[in-house]
């Protein structure tokens, strides 16, 4: 149940398609990063892939079965979701928030037990939050809450983790630690990320959304080209490749008051925009 396939997903709002005919497959064991400018449809796509919003056209299949026909409990065992701005009005401790992740595993014949306790402790430790376990949720900082949301998803022990901007609010140490953690667990991961360098560093593949459409999908080095970054993100960039095949993006500041380019200038008048990835200057 760790394979998620979307075909022709479309969702409309405000008289337009905010996700427009997106087809993609989340391959078992991969880390797929979803990138795109603000408003490009990442959160909406994630909600449909997680079964939280219904597509107006197209469908999502989990392990071959239609997601909307799969019992909620089975979906919850298979997919953990960390949404943006997830909140609780309840008075809960940090440990209780993480324990919510065990809900899909509990029932009349399987009450809370040692296994659940161990999963919660391990998840708290994984996100470096054990020392906050008994603190009131509402007394925690934004980054601490975000780490608990991720711990809740880990405690759920799903096959697939879907994360909407998981590094939101996190300091740099915890940004890298959280991404390294989900990568190291070899779970199937779909993560919407704003930092293209994080996507390049951690993702096996990157999907690029632009105005509701999936405009590129592939390995970081194939997708994160200066041309794609200029067209979709409206900034100039220089890309350096490392010996291990990874890449690092340096964004070029635009002169004060100038408009971002809709695409890069032609080669002959862009002496400082270097695509090292393809060995061109
Ligand atoms: N109910 C709605 N009515 C009208 N427009 C909507 C509605 N819901 C979402 N949208 C629009 O759909 C677009 C896609 O939103 P979405 O949150 O999926 O984008 P996103 O890529 O996740 O953005 P961000 O990077 O800013 O989080 C946005 O332009 C948003 O304003």
Image: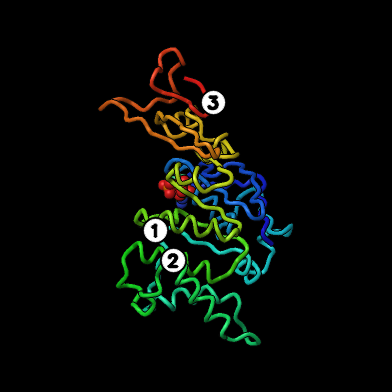
Q: Is residue 60 above or below residue 226?
A: below
Q: Position of residue 191 (x, y in %)?
A: 52, 52
Query: Which residue is denoted by mark 1 in the rendering?
Result: 174
Mark 1 lies on a secondary structure that is helix
Mark pair 1, 3: CA separation: 32 Å
Q: Residues within 10 Å of mark 3 (few under 14, many from 20)?
A: few
Residue furthest out toward the left: 256
Query: Which residue is denoted by mark 3 in the rendering?
Result: 278
Q: What residue is drawn where x is 54% and y is 42%?
A: 17
Q: Is residue 172 above or below residue 152?
A: above
Q: What residue is drawn where x is 32% and y is 70%?
A: 140
Mark 2 lies on a secondary structure that is loop
Query: Which residue is denoted by mark 2 in the rendering?
Result: 127
Mark 3 lies on a secondary structure that is helix
Contact, mark 1 vs mark 3 (Cβ under 8 Å): no
Quadrant where the N terminus is found in the figure: bottom right
Residue furthest out toward the front: 243
């Amino acid at each position: 149940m760790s394979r998620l396939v979307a075909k022709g997903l479309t969702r409309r709002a405000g008289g337009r398609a905010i996700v427009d005919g997106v087809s993609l497959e989340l391959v078992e064991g991969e880390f797929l990063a979803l990138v795109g400018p603000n408003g490009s449809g990442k959160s909406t796509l994630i909600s449909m892939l997680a079964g939280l919003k219904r597509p107006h056209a197209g469908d999502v299949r989990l392990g071959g079965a239609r997601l909307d026909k799969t019992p909620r409990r089975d979906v919850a065992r298979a997919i953990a979701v960390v949404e943006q701005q997830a909140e609780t009005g309840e008075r809960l401790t940090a440990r209780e928030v993480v324990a919510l992740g065990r809900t899909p595993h509990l029932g009349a014949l399987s009450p809370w037990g040692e296994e659940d306790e161990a999963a919660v402790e391990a998840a708290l430790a994984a996100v470096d939050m054990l020392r906050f376990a008994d603190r009131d949720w509402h007394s925690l900082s934004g980054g601490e809450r975000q780490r608990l949301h991720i711990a809740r998803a880990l405690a759920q022990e799903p096959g697939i983790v879907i994360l909407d901007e998981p590094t939101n609010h996190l300091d740099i140490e915890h940004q890298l630690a959280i991404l390294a953690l989900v990568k190291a667990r070899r779970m199937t991961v779909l993560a919407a990320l704003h930092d293209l360098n994080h996507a390049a560093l951690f993702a096996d593949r990157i999907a690029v959304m632009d105005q509701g459409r999936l405009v590129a999908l592939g390995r970081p080095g194939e997708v994160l080209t200066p041309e794609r970054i200029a067209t979709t993100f409206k900034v100039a960039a220089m890309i350096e490749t490392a010996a291990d095949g990874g890449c690092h993006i340096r964004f070029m500041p635009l002169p004060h008051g100038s408009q971002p380019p809709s695409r890069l200038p032609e080669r002959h008048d862009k002496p400082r925009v270097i695509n090292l990835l393809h060995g061109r200057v």
